[in-house]
Image (cartoon, grey):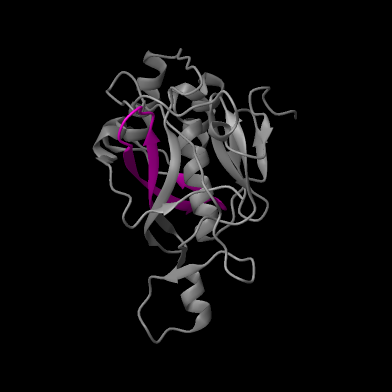
């Protein structure tokens, strides 16, 4: 099935191309009647001398290599990432981490790895925002969020304000990530968004929880269907892995 016309494949995030400038403030506003506007940016992929992504382990000393790899998290952006537009924002796509299926407004099929969870977090978050358009956020929330009252409230809030349009430069972009924990069943990731701003850079850190269910990563909806409770504003990127392009 052909991809939506606005998901043009790009080699670099849109803010690095002429005419697209990151400006003004995060649109990740989520009150009970309107949800989430945000999303994606980059710098330079960092890889080690072998061309692979460096990892750090969250498990105690004394584990085997196989056990350590099962809970290792990226300390640099995944290598080989390209970017695709979803509305006026960009999302990462990896040949090894996913998604493997992009159709009907959703992106699915992620690797059962820390990189797979990271790419899933970025893709699902962006596609579930009001700025992505109803053709994206409705099937994404319905199919890629775990069933719960919180998910139903999130969907109801989006449906209460179904139409949203944004101009280039109005939306926040992904600036990086901060892995908080990982197991083969659960990933907790701080997705860092750079707020459009003409002055001092501001960042929003959204704490996202993904669970491995039905052979794919699925997102847990925020309490009450509102992302505001999971959002932290900062101008400090200490401890953040900045995302980039090669």
Residue at image position (27%, 37%) is: 223
* Residue 226 versus residue 69 in the image, above or below: above
Based on the displayed image, in which of its 4 quarters is residue 2 positioned? top right
Q: Main secondary structure of the magenta part?
A: strand
In the figure, is residue 84 to the left or right of 165?
A: right
In the figure, is residue 13 to the left or right of 204?
A: right
Based on the displayed image, in which of its 4 quarters is residue 24 positioned? top left
Choose between 173 and 32: the one closer to the eye.
Answer: 173
Residue 66 showing in the rendered view: yes
| Image location of residue 56, percent across then percent down | 44, 70
| Image location of residue 115, percent across then percent down | 53, 57
Outermost residue, bottom side: 62
Q: Is residue 95 magenta?
A: no
In the figure, is residue 227 to the left or right of 82?
A: left
| Image location of residue 52, percent across then percent down | 61, 66
| Image location of residue 68, percent across then percent down | 47, 76
Choose between 2 and 165: the one closer to the eye.
Answer: 165
The residues colored magenta run: 189-218
Q: Is residue 205 magenta?
A: yes
* Residue 127 versus residue 95 in the image, above or below: above
């Amino acid at each position: 099935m052909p991809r939506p016309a606005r998901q043009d494949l790009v080699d670099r995030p849109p803010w690095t191309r002429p005419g697209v400038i990151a400006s003004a403030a995060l649109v990740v506003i989520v009150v009970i009647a309107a949800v989430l506007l945000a999303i994606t940016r980059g710098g330079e992929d960092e890889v080690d001398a072998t061309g692979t992504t460096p990892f750090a382990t969250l498990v105690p000393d004394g584990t085997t290599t196989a056990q350590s790899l099962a809970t290792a998290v990226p300390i640099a952006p995944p290598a080989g990432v390209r970017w695709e537009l979803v509305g006026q924002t960009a999302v990462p796509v990896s040949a090894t981490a996913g998604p493997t299926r992009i159709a009907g407004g959703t992106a699915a099929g992620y690797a059962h790895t820390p990189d797979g969870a990271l790419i899933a977090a970025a893709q699902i978050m962006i596609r579930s925002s009001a700025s992505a358009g109803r053709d994206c956020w409705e099937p994404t929330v319905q199919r890629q969020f775990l069933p719960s009252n919180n998910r139903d409230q999130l969907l109801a809030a989006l449906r209460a304000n179904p139409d949203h349009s944004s101009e280039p430069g109005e939306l926040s972009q992904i600036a990086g990530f901060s892995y908080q924990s990982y197991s083969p069943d659960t990933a907790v990731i701080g997705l860092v968004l750079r707020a459009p701003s003409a002055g001092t850079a501001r960042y929003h850190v959204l704490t996202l929880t993904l669970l491995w269910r039905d052979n794919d990563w699925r997102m847990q909806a925020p309490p009450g269907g509102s992302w505001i409770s999971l959002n932290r504003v900062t101008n400090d990127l200490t401890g953040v892995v900045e995302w980039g392009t090669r």
